[in-house]
Amino acid sequence: MTAENPTPAAPPDIDARIRELPVRAEVTEDSLVLEVDLSGTAAQLWEALTDPEQLAHWSPVVPDRALTSTGPALARENPEEDPVSADVLAIAGEHALTHRWGEATLGWMVDEGRLDLQVALADVQQAQYFAAGWHVCLAVLDARLEGLDQERIVGMDALEHGWDALRARYADEFGHPHGPAPGQDA
């Protein structure tokens, strides 16, 4: 028997990547905290969080300017939609960013290969929805940081990639009622 050169394994499909991405999640009395280890350096993560062109490849927050200085900004999930506030509230070097996303406030912390996200919530029952949505987006970001040409998955498109199963998992983890997915009857 002769040894053959093994065929390189194909990269996992995005749905498998989404299911397998190890996101640590916690709910406090007024916020959701997500922590994830991703491919890429701190500089690459920072660029992915602040550059509108890169955000347009993985995030629902696509601002009209770089998020590298405090002040007003507007964001659209899709070009045809009305803008929402993405005002940068605080920035610390190239490792901490706080900005609005409509009525939510997002706080990002970047470390080498790690990204932490804190979402201030008016109603912590919404944590399961935010956690599932950001989980999908972070898996796309991870794939892109690995050099894969993965398309952005946001909004209703996430339903086709395991969003509802993630939402149910987070609802159980947080001890919240499940409720229906967006667009589904109760």
Image (cartoon, helix red, strand yellow):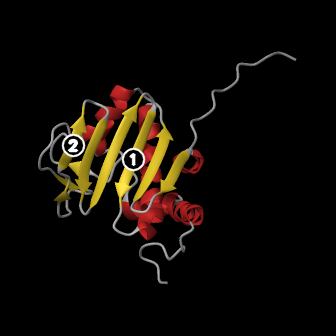
Give coordinates of residue 94: x percent, y percent: 28, 30
As helix, strand or loop, the secondary structure at mark 1 comes to: strand
Q: Residues within 10 Å of mark 2 (few under 14, many from 20)?
A: some
The residue where tag 1 is placed is 117
Residue at 12 percent of width and 46 percent of height: 71
Is residue 139 in view? no
Picture disc at residue 90:
2
Picture disc at residue 52:
none
Q: Farthest residue toward the left?
A: 72
With 174 as the anchor, is 90 left or right in this view?
Answer: left
As helix, strand or loop, the secondary structure at mark 2 comes to: strand
Is residue 175 in view? yes
With 11 as the anchor, is 132 left or right in this view?
Answer: left
Amino acid type, callout 1: Leu
Give coordinates of residue 154: x percent, y percent: 38, 56
Residue placed most toward the observer, 51 or 171: 171
Residue placed most toward the observer, 169 or 183: 169
Task: Reply above or below: 37 against 25.
Answer: above
Tag nearer the camera, 1 or 2: 2
